[in-house]
Amino acid sequence: MAFSVSASRSELAEINITPLVDVMLVLLVIFMVTAPMLSRPIDAMLPQPVPVKPVDPPNDLVLKVGLAGAYTLDDRAVTLSELRLRLEDARVSDPRTVLQVEAAEGADYQQLVSALAQAEASGLGNIVMRN
């Protein structure tokens, strides 16, 4: 089957836009119906902010372990036996007490471990190691 174009027929190919217009009108109606439903306010119970009362910062203690095994708690020299008592007193006065432990660069490791053991035995829960 061969197609031949006759010179006497001059038909122009045109796009039938009727189905396109039908689809566009259906979409327009759908959007016109659903748009008011989407813009309705939603009744919701939102949480209200609770006023925050200022919290006092926890008590910070600084324990330094020196080269010769010397201990200083807040720049006061203490012995290992006194250290536990002072840390217990600090914990009783403020349970949120934070102990910051610093060791000198050449300090004896055993002295540092002994100080940490005393801090743990005193019941302090917040111990921070600093450089």
Image (spheres, rainbow, N blue to C red):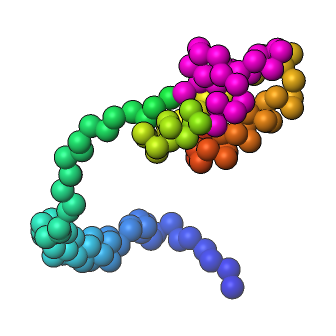
Q: Residue at x 24, y 44 (%)?
A: 52
Q: Residue furthest bottom?
A: 1
- Residue 58: x and y in percent read 43, 35
User: Could you tell me if residue 130 is visible in this image?
Assistant: no
Q: Nearer the viewer, residue 114 or 100?
A: 114
Position of residue 7 in the picture relative to residue 22 (left or right): right
- Residue 73: x and y in percent read 61, 22
- Residue 38: x and y in percent read 19, 69
Q: Quadrant of residue 42?
A: bottom left
Q: Residue 69: within the magenta? A: yes
Q: Residue at x 17, y 67 (%)?
A: 45
Q: Is residue 99 above or below residue 49?
A: above
Q: Give, as a single range, the part of the protein colored magenta.
A: 61-84
Position of residue 100 in the picture relative to residue 79 (left or right): left
Q: Nearer the viewer, residue 21 or 52?
A: 52
User: Could you tell me if residue 43 is visible in this image?
Assistant: yes
Q: Nearer the viewer, residue 46 or 55?
A: 55
Q: Residue 52: within the magenta? A: no
Q: Quadrant of the C terminus?
A: top right
Q: Residue at x 70, y 25 (%)?
A: 79
